[in-house]
Image (cartoon, helix red, strand yellow):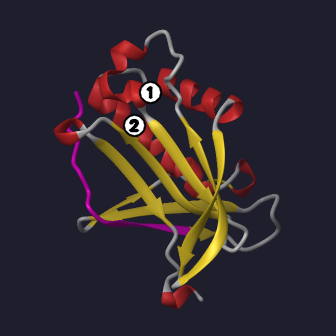
Amino acid sequence: MERFQPIEVGEVVLRMERGDAAGREVEITMIADGRKRVLDAFPASAGNPVLLAFLESSLRSMAGITGGSPFYIRNRLREALQSSGDVLSTDYELEGRKVAAQELVFHPFSTDPNAERMGAFSKLEIRFVVSPDVPGYFALFSARAGEGTDAFSEEIRFVQKEDAK
């Protein structure tokens, strides 16, 4: 089993090549505890790059902790995001002000026949907060499962960097 290394606070830095949208690539760098991890570049047309990086990071952590197949977990996540979920109206605090938002909540393993083999991840909750007032639309990405010492939590929050304004 892969050793899991908790990270309290880190950064996700997004860099997009300039040029026409059809040929642009996106590069994501994850920075935490003095370490940098540059993810493979992918086409800008593939979807929200931070969403893709978040889902991939979460599923790799789950696979490492449970010893499960990342392919199986990826397919369950994909199915859940395409077919189920709750949508709730909410407010989100952005740079000291509240903005209208929607919260999207998914439970990818709630009907999975192999859920018992997932341990605490059988009750995994994936949550997104989205708002048109947030650049890139996504304000929060969250994955949580388990409680106490068995808890798993991964979260990315949008924060506007001063030098990016």
Amino acid carrying mark 1 in the image: Pro
Magenta span: 1-14
Quote the CA–CA distance across marks 2 and 1: 6 Å
Task: Please tell me how many numbered marks the rendered image carries.
Answer: 2
What's the residue at 23%, 51% (across, down)? 6
Helix, strand or loop under label 1: helix
What amino acid type is highlighted by mark number 2? Arg
User: Would you name the residue on which mark 2 appears?
Assistant: 60
Residue 94 percent location from the top left of the image:
55, 78
Verify CB contact (< 8 Å) between mark 2 and mark 1.
yes
Asked whether 129 or 25 is in front, the reply is 129
Instruction: Classify 139 as above or below 94.
Output: above
Q: Position of residue 23 (x, y in %)?
A: 78, 59
Quadrant of the rendering where the C terminus is positioned: bottom right
Residue 70 is marked as 1
Residue beneath the point at 56% across and 57% down: 50
Disc 2 packing (10 Å; few <14; some 14–19; many ≥20): many
Q: Residue 48: give x, y in percent of width and height.
A: 66, 55
